[in-house]
Amino acid sequence: MKKSFAVIGLGRFGGSICRTLTDEGMEVLAIDKNEERVNEYAMIASHAVVGDTTDEAVLKSLGIRNFDHVIVAIGDDIQSSILTTLILKELGVVRITAKAQNDYHEKVLRKIGADSVVHPERDMGKRIANNMASSNVVDYLELSDEHSIVEIVANEKLSGHTIMDLDIRKKYGLNIVAIKRGEEIIVSPQAKETFYRNDVLIVIGTDQDINKFEKKVLE
């Protein structure tokens, strides 16, 4: 079923979300105080409006509470971000995701009711650093401060071994959720599944256990 989203703030982060959701066929309302930005997204989003979202009357007039998910992607104006999030919560918006500038900003956003908080710059920095630090890691997604999902390319050491042989869950505390082999994706692979060189393993676990696995098995 088609979901409805409102994206507040059309900077690089909000604009990217707006484009991606639209490409996925979702209904998207794009909102920004800057008329130039709104004009840019008028041909992309389902609707694009100029509005000050720190004004409760503006949000009410847009019927914001009827949207399935509202993303607060306001850039450098932390006060506007917090006030907008607070008003959305008070208006009864079902799901709110907000962009945080720093850890203090995140604490405030969570306290006033944001369902999820993202740090795009910090998270992207971690992703890039992890990819650069290991030649085997091709992608990295932080789930929490301690847990991540990584895509790891199987090398010669793994080739020919099964999940059971390596006893990955017991020895390293990791779960292999899928294996990408060319165009094929093996979801929830069985213990007898054999690894081949250049398989991409999608692994979930703590950062500590992932690092231990990389050092012991992949280097």
Image (cartoon, rainbow, N blue to C red):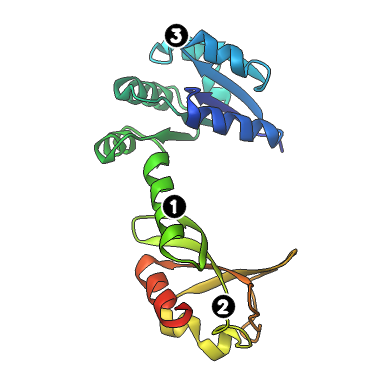
Q: Nearer the viewer, residue 202 or 86?
A: 202
Sequence order check, earlier mark of 2 and 3: 3
The percent coordinates of residue 81 (x first, y second) are 36, 24
When the figure is inspected, residue 136 is found, relative to residue 48, above or below; the finding is below
At horizontal 57% and vertical 20% (from top left) the residue drawn is 30
Question: Which residue is situated farthest in the left direction here?
Answer: 104
Confirm whether residue 61 shows in the render. Answer: no
Which class describes the residues within 10 Å of circle 2: few (<14), some (14-19), or many (20+)?
Answer: some
The percent coordinates of residue 163 (x first, y second) are 57, 84
Question: Which residue is situated farthest in the right direction here?
Answer: 183
User: What is the spatial separation of the Cα atoms under label 3 and label 1, in whole angstroms?
Assistant: 41 Å
Q: Which residue is mark 1?
A: 128
On screen, residue 6 versus residue 100, left or right, reads right
User: What is the spatial separation of the Cα atoms under label 2 and label 1, in whole angstroms?
Assistant: 21 Å
User: What is the spatial separation of the Cα atoms under label 2 and label 3, in whole angstroms?
Assistant: 58 Å
Which class describes the residues within 10 Å of circle 1: few (<14), some (14-19), or many (20+)?
Answer: few
On screen, residue 139 versus residue 214, left or right, reads right
Q: Nearer the viewer, residue 170 or 139?
A: 139
Image quarter of the C terminus: bottom left
Please say if the residues under marks 2 and 1 sit with CB atoms less than 8 Å apart.
no
Q: Secondary structure at mark 2?
A: loop
Which class describes the residues within 10 Å of circle 3: few (<14), some (14-19), or many (20+)?
Answer: few
Please say if the residues under marks 3 and 1 sit with CB atoms less than 8 Å apart.
no
Q: Secondary structure at mark 3?
A: helix
Q: Point out which mark residue 155 bears.
A: 2
Q: Which residue is mark 3?
A: 57
Q: Nearer the viewer, residue 131 or 49?
A: 131
